[in-house]
């Protein structure tokens, strides 16, 4: 058959990337790639959460017409100010002792406090 008359089905027969007897879903649902899908899913949730918090909680981004109409709308909505000032993620996690075997994290304030020379033992 000449290439002008060939349809995509004929061109895809024997395509080397998909072995005969398998479908694309069988290739992509291999248990070896589950960690990859989990990582992509977690990254999507973190990125989506950050972008949602950013656009819905930033004081400079206004969806309301009354807030957009003012020249300084940064403090008109207390909820948006509180959301803007809060941190997304584990920003307070580095302020406390964290022990998950075999890892041990000691915050910088505790290390400084332990090595102070003006503190009595």
Image (cartoon, rainbow, N blue to C red):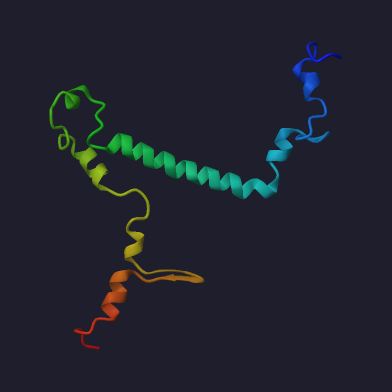
Q: Position of residue 71 (x, y in %)?
A: 13, 28
Residue at the far bottom: name it. Answer: 121
Q: Position of residue 66 (x, y in %)?
A: 17, 24
User: Does residue 105 sit above or below 15 in this rendering?
Assistant: below
Identify the residue shown where x is 75% and y is 18%.
Answer: 8
Q: Position of residue 121 (x, y in %)?
A: 25, 88
Identify the residue shown where x is 77% and y is 15%.
Answer: 7
Is 29 displayed left or right of 92 in the figure? right
Identify the residue shown where x is 33% and y is 56%.
Answer: 91
Is 85 displayed left or right of 36 in the figure? left
Occupied quadrant, residue 114:
bottom left
Is 10 displayed left or right of 84 in the figure? right
User: Does residue 117 sit above or below 53 in this rendering?
Assistant: below
Occupied quadrant, residue 92:
bottom left
Residue at the far left: name it. Answer: 71
Identify the residue shown where x is 80% and y is 11%.
Answer: 5
């Amino acid at each position: 058959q000449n290439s002008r008359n060939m349809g995509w089905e004929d061109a895809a027969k024997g395509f080397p990337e998909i072995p005969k007897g398998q479908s694309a879903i069988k290739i992509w649902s291999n248990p070896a790639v589950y960690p990859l899908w989990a990582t992509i899913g977690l990254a999507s949730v973190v990125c989506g959460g950050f972008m949602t918090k950013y656009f819905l909680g930033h004081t400079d981004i206004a969806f309301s017409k009354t807030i957009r109409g003012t020249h300084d709308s940064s403090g008109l909505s207390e909820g948006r100010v509180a959301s803007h000032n809060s941190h997304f993620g584990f920003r307070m996690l580095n302020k406390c002792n964290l022990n998950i075997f075999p890892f041990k994290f000691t915050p910088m304030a505790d290390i400084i406090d332990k090595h102070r020379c003006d503190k009595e033992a």
